[in-house]
Image (cartoon, helix red, strand yellow):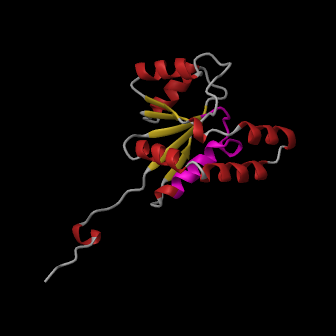
Amino acid sequence: MTQIVTIMDIGVVLMALELFTVGYEGYHIDGFIAHLKNHSINCLLDVREIPLSRKKGFSKSALAQRLQKEKITYLHLKALGSPKPIRNKLKENGDYGSFFKKMNEHLNNETETIEEAYHYIVQKKCCLMCFEHPAHNCHRIAVANKIKERDGNGLVINNI
């Protein structure tokens, strides 16, 4: 006779994964790195469509090199960035409701990249990064929510 053993029988507790998000607005590179380290982040997922910045140290190459020195994995996920037409429409009308609706539609077509991000999240303590400091004004929260949907196990999102 086959015995069915459940997770509860063997005392295993499944812990929800944790995902952080951060905007580098208002930071200098040294303070930004310290902020990541204060939260024990060891993987930065850059979700800017175009990873360029007027702020010294935050463009893709410089940031990747600096993070490598700090032993923090860097991955640019262009497909999870906010496409220019969606960004331009937001600049034009300031309608965040429409912006997030369009972002969700865009992200629905990026399942492969969502899966790539999730692969890192289950292995490392990851943080999604974009520019805007407040998460509620940034597409990274839509990305985080799409990853949470993919997880299906109560992924905890922390904006730092």
Residue 72 location (% of width, % of height)? 42, 28
Please report the residue visible at 65 percent of the width from the left and 22 percent of the height from the top. 53
Front position in the image: 67 or 92: 92
Please report the residue visible at 46 percent of the width from the left and 44 percent of the height from the top. 116
Front position in the image: 51 or 7: 51
Front position in the image: 77 or 149: 77
Q: Is residue 2 above or below residue 124?
A: below
Residue 7 highlighted magenta (yes or no): no
Segment colored magenta: 130-149
Residue 15 location (% of width, % of height)? 38, 56
Q: Is residue 43 above or below residue 145?
A: above
The image quadrant where one finds the N terminus is bottom left
Q: Main secondary structure of the magenta part?
A: helix
Residue 138 location (% of width, % of height)? 68, 41
- Circle count: 0
**What is the quadrant of residue 92 in the picture?**
top right
Residue found at the far right of this picture: 93
